[in-house]
Amino acid sequence: MKPLPVLIALAVTSFTLSSAQQTATSKPPAPGLRSSTSATSPDPNMPRPIAAHDTVFIEELTWLEVRDALRAGKTTVLIATGGVEMNGPYLATGKHNYVLRAATEAIARKLGNALVAPIVAFVPEGNIDPPTEHMRYPGTISLRPETYKLLLTDIAASLRAHGFEHIILIGDSGGNQTGMKEVAAELSARWAGGKTKIHFIPEFYNYPAVTQWLESKGIKQVDEGHHDDLAMEAMMLSVDPTTVRIKERIAAGKFSINGVPLQPVDKTIDLGKRIIDFRATATVEAIKKAIGK
């Protein structure tokens, strides 16, 4: 048996080595790798170091670009609601979100003084448990109406805090409309007398007008019983052709909708762009009327 002094010496040596190892492994990162206070709280008035990127989408802009856009007079902002839901057998579940990507850009550029908030992808789609409406089908994501309204309220309040003067609510799905209308009314009352105004624009969601426009061009559809139609497919084709499954449908001999062939593809894509322009023009007129311009 080792004498007590030896055991104590071994214990001290072991503790010292262990402490040294812990110190080595827990050494803080080099100063250049850490976030400093100045990095996370830069001067709000610092100059923008590079030219601004040309986009109307806030999520694609830097905070400096958003700041300077506001200072340059882009004080209108669009909040658009889409959805992730069951559609026809050929369309991606994010149908409305794809359409809004093109429509909101067209509206913002026609207005000339507007930016676009990130598209609100999740909306009420039916009861979750037990599932009703679109929630009966896989892939659908639903929000409770109160959650949806709170989400819109916080998004709008955030944009108001940054200095936007006109907040525009539009939606591409029928189930989105009531919540937007209610939020606009509630915030209008809450913000009464303030600089920021909020407007719900129901004119954007006017698919009967789109159908009439198509018929004026000699295009008539026959209802095939799908949650789908020519206007929707044409607009989606103009944004991302894969969302309507071109190759798969051509291979299966099903590249048509409601009795209307979708080939040639270029022609249908052009039709989609024209539909988006038609809707954007009508929406811009409604927005200008709402804000008194």
Image: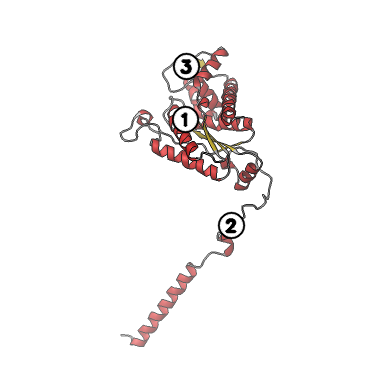
Task: Please state which of residues 136 and 178 is positioned toward the viewer in this rendering.
Answer: 178
* Quadrant of the snapshot with the C terminus: top right
In the rendered view, how is the structure colored?
Answer: secondary structure
Residue 164 in the image: above or below residue 234: below
For mark 1, give the secondary structure.
loop
Q: Is residue 69 visible?
A: yes
Read off the residue under disc 3.
Answer: 258
Residue 147 in the image: above or below residue 234: below
Residue at 59% x, 62% y: name it. Answer: 32
Name the amino acid type tagged 2: Ala
Q: CA distance from mark 3 to mark 2?
A: 56 Å
Q: Give coordinates of residue 51: x percent, y percent.
A: 69, 45
Q: Earlier in the sequence, mark 1 or mark 2?
A: 2
For mark 3, give the secondary structure.
loop
Residue at 55% x, 39% y: name it. Answer: 196
Q: CA distance from mark 3 to mark 1?
A: 18 Å
Task: Please state which of residues 199 and 237 is positioned toward the viewer in this rendering.
Answer: 199
- Give the number of the disc on residue 39: 2
Name the amino acid type tagged 3: Asn
Name the amino acid type tagged 1: Ala
Q: Callout 2: 10 Å neighbours few (<14), some, many (20+)?
A: few
Q: Give coordinates of residue 26: x percent, y percent.
A: 48, 67
Q: Earlier in the sequence, mark 3 or mark 1?
A: 1
Q: Callout 1: 10 Å neighbours few (<14), some, many (20+)?
A: many
Read off the residue under disc 1.
Answer: 92
Q: Give coordinates of residue 126: x percent, y percent.
A: 37, 31
For mark 2, give the secondary structure.
helix
Q: CA distance from mark 1 to mark 2?
A: 40 Å
